[in-house]
Amino acid sequence: MAGSISEFLSSFNRDPARSNRFEVYIPYFNTLNGRDAPSLNSVYRCEIAQLPGRNFSTIEQKIYGPIEKFPYWSNYNDIDLTFIVDDDMKTKTAFDDWMEYINPTKNFNFNYKSDYVIDITISQYDALNELSYQVKLIDAFPINMNQLDLDWSSDSIHKLTVTFAYTYWKSIPI
């Protein structure tokens, strides 16, 4: 027999985690193209984010009995961060500059990865706005930036989605 709703609710020691209580911290370079970069680390700027996942590549083997899967490689998926863009377009300019630094259009020679990667911190807060979970994306950098559509018939705000690659992520103890 299935449990009652009250039994289900009593199984929670705390409130369920809320997806709208987060912050993304991106320590940005101040040396790109000789410009001062804006701060991109506010919950008011990053509207949509994800806590990263992890999966294993597996190989199937049959030793005796049923076929079994064995892990041999860790995979870390890219994540998307969506930013609200102010009228001054500094958020867009910051990511333009970062991507230009990675691969300058004057010669299209990529810079060394160690010169453009950073660690991004994503923090989850509980219902009382206390830090409850935190991860750090190690050696992150932008690999894709969406276009911003211009439309005279619309009065919507610009939202810039940037896809980041990273080497791996780790939980930060709270």
Image: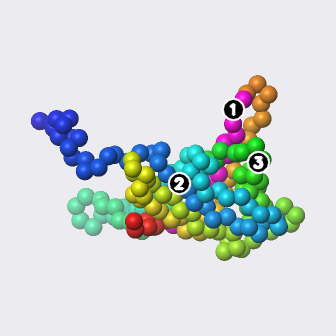
Q: Picture coordinates of residue 44 (x, y %)?
A: 59, 48
Element under disc 1: loop
Residue 89 disc label: 3
Is the residue 168 above or below the residue 144 in the image?
below
How many numbered marks appear? 3
Q: Which residues are magenta?
A: 155-168
Q: Picture coordinates of residue 164 (x, y %)?
A: 61, 57
Q: Picture coordinates of residue 145 (x, y %)?
A: 69, 50
Which residue is most to the right?
106
Residue 153 inside the magenta-drawn segment: no
Front position in the image: 163 or 16: 16
Q: Earlier in the sequence, mark 3 or mark 1?
A: 3
Please report the residue visible at 40 percent of the width from the left and 68 percent of the height from the top: 173
Residue under label 1: 156
Residue under label 2: 23
Please report the residue visible at 47 percent of the width from the left and 48 percent of the height from the top: 21
Amino acid type, label 1: Ser
CA–CA distance in space, label 3 to label 2: 21 Å
- Quadrant, the C terminus: bottom left
Residue 166 inside the magenta-drawn segment: yes
Q: CB of mark 3 within 8 Å of CB of mark 2?
A: no
